[in-house]
Image (cartoon, rainbow, N blue to C red):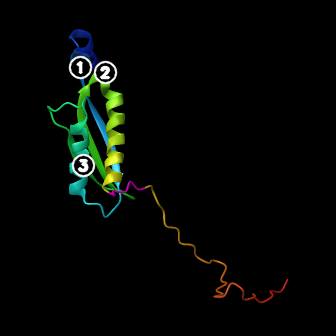
Amino acid sequence: MPNSNLISNDLINWTLSDSRKRMEVKVGVAYGSDPNIVLKLIERVALDHPHVEQNPPPRALFEGFGDSSLDFRLLFWVNFEFGLSAKSDVAVGIYNTFAEHNIEIPFPQIDLHVKDISGNRSKNKNEQMPDTPD
């Protein structure tokens, strides 16, 4: 918005005109989990929460394929005063629901492959390496 509009026109703060607020919870699940089931479960957790608005209904979305997880996003509306507590409750509810359905929330993992750059290729660790000249 150009500065001239701020000076010469009325500005409406839409945040203060509505008592509702959209919340977002992001979660990743282990590869091998069925994304269709995950979408239904996280949406159900939000629908079952007493402070989550039913209209518009909560929306669960599959975001993509992460490095260590299938990534999801849950969007829902709550009354402004219940925003943080509802978000916390829904997140804990998702965790509990995943535990009940044996859906794993993974942590980032990195596979490390170590190469022998010294040139020593001894197969037996107990085998003595030949003496090298000083």
Tell me which corner region of the image, top left, top right, bottom left or bottom right, holds residue 116. Answer: bottom right
**Label 3's element?**
helix
Q: Measure the C-alpha gap from mark 2 to mark 1.
A: 8 Å
Badge 3 local density, few (<14 within 10 Å), some, or many (20+)? Answer: some
Q: Which residues are magenta?
A: 102-106
Residue 34, position as x, y percentages in the image: 25, 60
Residue 92, position as x, y percentages in the image: 36, 41
Left or right: where does residue 89 sit relative to residue 49?
A: right
Answer yes or no: do the residues labelled 2 and 1 have beta carbons within 8 Å?
Answer: yes
Residue displayed at 36% across by 47% down = 95
Instruction: Say which of 40 and 107 sits in front.
Output: 40
Q: Is residue 105 magenta?
A: yes
Q: Which residue is mark 3?
A: 41
Q: Which residue is mark 1?
A: 19
| Badge 1 amino acid | Ser
Above-or-below relation of 32 to 76? below
Q: Which residue is mark 2?
A: 81
Instruction: Say which of 5 and 113 sits in front.
Output: 113
Q: Is residue 34 magenta?
A: no
| Badge 3 amino acid | Leu
**Label 2's element?**
helix
Which tag is nearer the camera, tag 2 or tag 3?
Answer: 3
Above-or-below relation of 101 to 90? below
Farthest-out residue, right: 134
Tell me which corner region of the image, top left, top right, bottom left or bottom right, holds residue 32. Answer: bottom left
Left or right: where does residue 81 sit relative to residue 107?
A: left
